[in-house]
Structures are given as structure tokens and as C-alpha cells.
Image (tube, helix red, strand yellow):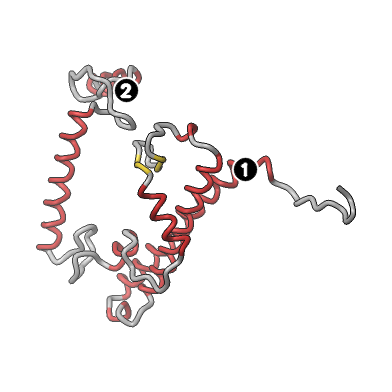
Amino acid sequence: MTAATELYLEKKVAQLCTYHRCKCAPAEGAQLCPRHLRKQRKRDARYKARLRARRRHAGQCAFCPAKSKTYRCMACVIKAGFAPRKSVQSSVDKSARIAARTVMHGDGRTRYHGQARRGQQSRAQLDEQDLADAIARLQRAKDGLAAARSPEAQLLPRIQREDAERAALAQLELAGRFLDDVGERNSRLNGPVRIPASGRR
């Protein structure tokens, strides 16, 4: 283990900004202080913008190395949730409203604004959030498969069509994770439904 790695781990355990010699407290959900986090995000944004420009100049999708005449290849369109929707569902609209009230934290999960820890939310809030996320992922899979199998998609090379279908089917796995969270959270309720006998109170 290098000295730099040891210093990084020590600062992480001590809950200090992990940037070089900075001794400030890290921002919520991050390992850098607010000032260094802003700088890091700007650097990341510049790098990603340059990478997208290089890929487009090379005739590739801006977000992956696949050849594409459009800014995003079909697989990346599906991953981003931009596939055309065949129908409008209130459950998906509800998911969008919940997303507007949430914030992404360092562990990759979304939480309601003003609540730093997932455990501070009620079980009902967590269930509502995870079920809405699962529904949104299922809708994304449905729309993605429809787009990947559309007449327009048939004009694409076979490899790109298959990549698009894989991207759509991957949304099912992500939806399953949210459903697993709901099931695990409510595991104490597992078992047959008890129906009172007729006439009993």
C-alpha cells in the first residue's frame, strides 16, 4: 500500500476531505469538502464533454464507442430513458414527481430532500419511492424493447439492435432490485393472508 493510499484511507476514516492536505469536513454524501467537490465536478464535466466531442467526431455515439449517425445510439437512448413512450401511465408520472423531491447521494441511492440517511425515512416513504422507481424501470424496459424492435431499428446493424435489446432488458434487473428492497423491508409480513371466518369478529 502506498503512502498516498494510506493517507487517503486515514482521512476517509477520520471523515475529512480526502483531497491532498485539506482538513475540511466532507460534503454530505461525498468524500470531498464542498469546495473541492465543486472543482472535481467541473473537471469531470469538462472531461466528459471533450470525450463526447471526440466520439462524435469519430462517428461514434457520444456516450459509448458504438458507431452511430445520431448523438446517442439506440442502446444509450434506452439506458437514458429517452425511448419513445407508447402510452402514458399515471404510475410513471407519479415516479417523476417523486424523483423531483429526491436527491442522489454518494451511495448511488435517491433519498427525499432534507433526509441525509435512508433510515430516517418511514417504511411507507421507502416503499413508495422504491415501487415508483421499479415501475419507472419497467416502463423504460417496455419502451426500450418497443424501440429496439421498431421498423426504424431494423435498419440498424444486427449488433446495434441486440445491444439495444440488452439495454432494455437490463432495466428489468434494476427494477427487480427495487422490488427486492421492498420485499426485504416488509419480510415480517411474509406468509399466507389470514381471512377471518364468516360471522366471526
Residue at 17%, 45% in the rendered image: 45
Question: Disc count in the image?
Answer: 2
Residue 147: x, y in percent? Answer: 36, 73
Left or right of 54 on screen, residue 99? right
* Residue that label 2 marks: 12
Residue 108: x, y in percent? Answer: 37, 41
Residue at 38%, 44% in the rendered image: 102
Q: Nearer the viewer, residue 36 or 75?
A: 36
The 10 Å Cα crowd at callout 1, few under 14, some 14 to 19, many 20 or more, is few
Whether residue 193 is situated above or below residue 86 in the rendered picture:
above
Task: Give the quadrant of the N terminus.
Answer: top left
Whether residue 33 is situated above or below residue 84 in the rendered picture:
above
Name the kind of residue labelled 2 in the image: Lys
Cα separation between marks 1 and 2: 33 Å
The local secondary structure at tag 2 comes to helix
* Residue that label 1 marks: 186
Residue 40: x, y in percent? Answer: 18, 35
